[in-house]
Amino acid sequence: MAEFKPVDAAAFEQAARRGRQASSTPRATSARFDRRTQKVVIKLNTGIEFAFDPRLAAGLNDASPDDLVGVTVEGMGSTLHFPRLDADFTVSRLLEGFLGPLDWTRREARALASRENGKRGGRPKREAAATS
């Protein structure tokens, strides 16, 4: 049986920070293959729904419709898994591939650092260069 380890306040805050950062990044809430339109349809936690033609995605271009049925969302919504193909695609890479470069993680990390600095009184003042 696993040993229970109590969580201290610092570890709890670090986990909460990771959770806030993860929730601010677009994540898939559902995915399916639509046989009528021949597209993979993905719903995001942002309320956006998008679809793409699997023939345009490397690794799915030769897949049959039967191979695409059964797509699942994994990894807290960050990954799509196609079980019949044993293929995984990250949602952020799919979005980048079809919409252009989107750097949510770096933008969110900067915003988080800025908020933390704000809690401490803002950006530290620069010391004047010492002259000899």
Image (cartoon, grey):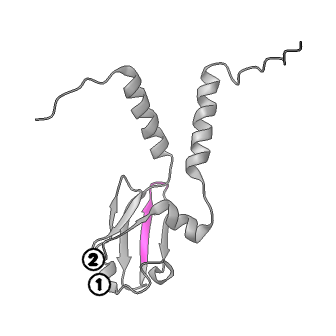
Q: Can you say whether 44 is above or below 24 in the image? A: below
Image coords of residue 41 (percent x, y): 42, 72
Q: Secondary structure at mark 1?
A: helix
The amino acid pointed to by label 2 is Arg
Q: Which residues are magenta?
A: 40-46
Q: Can you say whether 81 is above or below 112 in the image? A: below
Q: Which residue is pictured at 58% across the width and 27% down the height? A: 116
* Residue 48 seen in the figure: no
Q: Which residue is pictured at 60% across the width and 33% down the height? A: 113
Q: Secondary structure at mark 2?
A: loop
Image coords of residue 51 (percent x, y): 48, 73
Inspect the magenta stretch and tell me whether residue 80 lies in it: no
**Which quadrant of the figure contains the N terminus?**
top left
Circle 1 packing at 10 Å, graded few (<14), some (14-19), many (20+), is few
Q: For this rendering, which residue is in front, 62 or 16?
A: 62
Image coords of residue 119 (percent x, y): 60, 22
**Which quadrant of the figure contains the C terminus?**
top right
* Residue 57 seen in the figure: yes
Going by the picture, which residue comes out furthest to the right?
Answer: 132
Magenta span dominant secondary structure:
strand
Q: Which residue is pictured at 61% across the width and 38% down the height? A: 111
